[in-house]
Image (cartoon, rainbow, N blue to C red):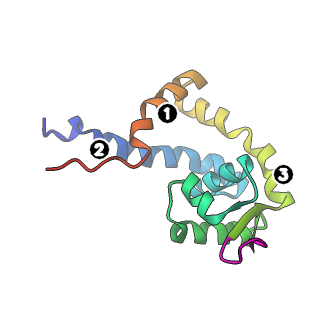
Amino acid sequence: MLRLDNQLCFALVTAARNVVSIYRPILEPLGLTHPQYLVMLALWEDSPRSLRDLADALALEPATLSPLVKRLESQGLVTRARSGADERVLDVGLTLEGAGLRTRALEVPGRVMAVTGMDAAEIARLRDALTRFSGRMPVVPS
Protein backbone atom coordinates (compact mmCIF):
# COMPACT_ATOMS: atom_id res chain seq x y z
CA MET A 1 0.00 0.00 0.00
CA LEU A 2 2.87 2.41 0.62
CA ARG A 3 4.38 2.19 -2.85
CA LEU A 4 4.66 5.62 -4.48
CA ASP A 5 2.83 4.47 -7.59
CA ASN A 6 -0.14 3.39 -5.45
CA GLN A 7 -0.67 6.85 -3.99
CA LEU A 8 -3.56 8.97 -5.23
CA CYS A 9 -1.79 12.14 -4.05
CA PHE A 10 1.22 11.36 -6.25
CA ALA A 11 -0.94 10.69 -9.30
CA LEU A 12 -2.83 13.96 -8.80
CA VAL A 13 0.30 16.07 -8.24
CA THR A 14 2.08 14.69 -11.28
CA ALA A 15 -1.07 14.99 -13.40
CA ALA A 16 -1.51 18.64 -12.34
CA ARG A 17 2.07 19.42 -13.27
CA ASN A 18 1.65 17.71 -16.64
CA VAL A 19 -1.63 19.51 -17.36
CA VAL A 20 0.09 22.86 -16.87
CA SER A 21 2.89 21.79 -19.24
CA ILE A 22 0.29 20.78 -21.84
CA TYR A 23 -1.46 24.15 -21.63
CA ARG A 24 1.73 26.28 -21.63
CA PRO A 25 2.49 26.18 -25.38
CA ILE A 26 -1.22 26.42 -26.23
CA LEU A 27 -1.70 29.55 -24.12
CA GLU A 28 1.58 31.22 -25.07
CA PRO A 29 0.23 32.73 -28.33
CA LEU A 30 -2.61 34.25 -26.28
CA GLY A 31 -0.07 35.85 -23.94
CA LEU A 32 -1.48 34.00 -20.94
CA THR A 33 -0.08 31.74 -18.29
CA HIS A 34 -2.25 28.88 -17.04
CA PRO A 35 -3.33 30.77 -13.87
CA GLN A 36 -4.11 33.86 -15.96
CA TYR A 37 -6.17 31.72 -18.33
CA LEU A 38 -8.25 30.48 -15.40
CA VAL A 39 -8.89 34.07 -14.30
CA MET A 40 -9.95 35.00 -17.82
CA LEU A 41 -12.27 31.96 -18.03
CA ALA A 42 -14.00 33.09 -14.84
CA LEU A 43 -14.34 36.65 -16.15
CA TRP A 44 -15.64 35.48 -19.54
CA GLU A 45 -18.42 33.74 -17.58
CA ASP A 46 -19.26 36.78 -15.45
CA SER A 47 -17.79 40.28 -15.59
CA PRO A 48 -17.38 42.49 -13.74
CA ARG A 49 -17.17 40.71 -10.43
CA SER A 50 -15.59 41.44 -7.09
CA LEU A 51 -12.09 40.24 -6.37
CA ARG A 52 -13.53 38.16 -3.51
CA ASP A 53 -16.11 36.51 -5.80
CA LEU A 54 -13.44 35.86 -8.41
CA ALA A 55 -11.14 34.35 -5.77
CA ASP A 56 -13.95 32.11 -4.53
CA ALA A 57 -14.74 30.95 -8.07
CA LEU A 58 -11.08 30.05 -8.60
CA ALA A 59 -10.60 28.51 -5.13
CA LEU A 60 -7.82 31.02 -4.40
CA GLU A 61 -7.11 33.50 -1.66
CA PRO A 62 -7.57 37.15 -2.73
CA ALA A 63 -3.92 37.81 -1.83
CA THR A 64 -2.86 35.10 -4.28
CA LEU A 65 -5.22 36.35 -6.97
CA SER A 66 -4.28 40.06 -6.73
CA PRO A 67 -0.89 39.76 -8.51
CA LEU A 68 -2.51 37.76 -11.32
CA VAL A 69 -5.17 40.43 -11.78
CA LYS A 70 -2.57 43.22 -11.68
CA ARG A 71 -0.56 41.48 -14.39
CA LEU A 72 -3.68 41.05 -16.55
CA GLU A 73 -4.44 44.73 -16.00
CA SER A 74 -0.91 45.69 -17.14
CA GLN A 75 -1.54 43.58 -20.27
CA GLY A 76 -4.69 45.61 -20.95
CA LEU A 77 -7.04 42.65 -20.50
CA VAL A 78 -8.83 43.61 -17.27
CA THR A 79 -9.71 46.65 -15.21
CA ARG A 80 -9.67 47.03 -11.45
CA ALA A 81 -11.87 49.64 -9.79
CA ARG A 82 -13.40 50.28 -6.40
CA SER A 83 -17.09 49.48 -6.30
CA GLY A 84 -19.40 52.49 -6.30
CA ALA A 85 -21.69 50.71 -3.85
CA ASP A 86 -18.95 49.75 -1.37
CA GLU A 87 -15.50 51.30 -1.55
CA ARG A 88 -14.00 48.29 0.26
CA VAL A 89 -14.88 46.06 -2.69
CA LEU A 90 -12.54 45.83 -5.67
CA ASP A 91 -14.35 45.03 -8.92
CA VAL A 92 -12.52 43.27 -11.74
CA GLY A 93 -13.87 43.57 -15.25
CA LEU A 94 -12.87 42.84 -18.81
CA THR A 95 -11.54 45.43 -21.21
CA LEU A 96 -12.62 45.25 -24.85
CA GLU A 97 -9.32 43.52 -25.59
CA GLY A 98 -9.88 41.04 -22.75
CA ALA A 99 -13.40 40.26 -23.97
CA GLY A 100 -12.10 39.88 -27.52
CA LEU A 101 -9.44 37.42 -26.45
CA ARG A 102 -12.23 34.93 -25.74
CA THR A 103 -12.68 34.34 -29.47
CA ARG A 104 -9.05 33.31 -29.83
CA ALA A 105 -9.31 31.13 -26.70
CA LEU A 106 -12.11 29.06 -28.23
CA GLU A 107 -9.41 26.91 -29.85
CA VAL A 108 -7.79 25.96 -26.52
CA PRO A 109 -10.04 22.98 -25.58
CA GLY A 110 -9.68 21.42 -29.02
CA ARG A 111 -5.92 21.78 -28.92
CA VAL A 112 -5.82 20.18 -25.46
CA MET A 113 -7.90 17.27 -26.78
CA ALA A 114 -5.52 16.87 -29.72
CA VAL A 115 -2.44 16.83 -27.48
CA THR A 116 -3.93 14.37 -24.98
CA GLY A 117 -5.66 12.16 -27.53
CA MET A 118 -8.86 12.44 -25.49
CA ASP A 119 -12.26 13.52 -26.77
CA ALA A 120 -14.65 15.87 -25.00
CA ALA A 121 -16.57 13.03 -23.35
CA GLU A 122 -13.38 11.44 -21.94
CA ILE A 123 -12.19 14.79 -20.59
CA ALA A 124 -15.61 15.42 -19.01
CA ARG A 125 -15.55 12.01 -17.31
CA LEU A 126 -12.06 12.65 -15.94
CA ARG A 127 -13.04 16.14 -14.75
CA ASP A 128 -16.16 14.77 -13.08
CA ALA A 129 -14.17 11.99 -11.39
CA LEU A 130 -11.89 14.64 -9.87
CA THR A 131 -14.75 16.74 -8.50
CA ARG A 132 -14.45 15.21 -5.02
CA PHE A 133 -10.88 16.49 -4.84
CA SER A 134 -11.44 19.95 -6.28
CA GLY A 135 -13.03 21.54 -3.22
CA ARG A 136 -12.24 21.76 0.43
CA MET A 137 -12.22 18.32 1.96
CA PRO A 138 -13.12 17.67 5.60
CA VAL A 139 -10.14 16.96 7.83
CA VAL A 140 -9.97 13.28 8.68
CA PRO A 141 -8.94 12.67 12.30
CA SER A 142 -5.77 10.65 12.73
**In the rendering, which numbered label is found on residue 55?**
none
Which of the two discs, 3 and 1, labels the residue nearer the N terminus? 3
* Residue for badge 1: 127
* Residue for badge 2: 9
* Residue for badge 3: 100
Of badges 3 and 1, the one in the foreground is: 1
The kind of residue tagged 1 is Arg
Which of the two discs, 1 and 2, labels the residue nearer the N terminus? 2
Rendered location of residue 11, percent (x, y): 32, 40
Which of the two discs, 3 and 2, labels the residue nearer the N terminus? 2
Q: In terms of image quadrants, where is residue 88?
A: bottom right
In-image side of 69 versus 63 (left or right): right
**Quarter of the figure that contains the N terminus:** top left
Helix, strand or loop at mark 3: helix
Circle 1: is it few (<14), some (14-19), or many (20+) Cα within 10 Å? few
What is the number of callouts on the image?
A: 3
Circle 2: is it few (<14), some (14-19), or many (20+) Cα within 10 Å? few
Q: Is residue 117 visible?
A: no
Q: Residue at x 68, y 71 (%)?
A: 90
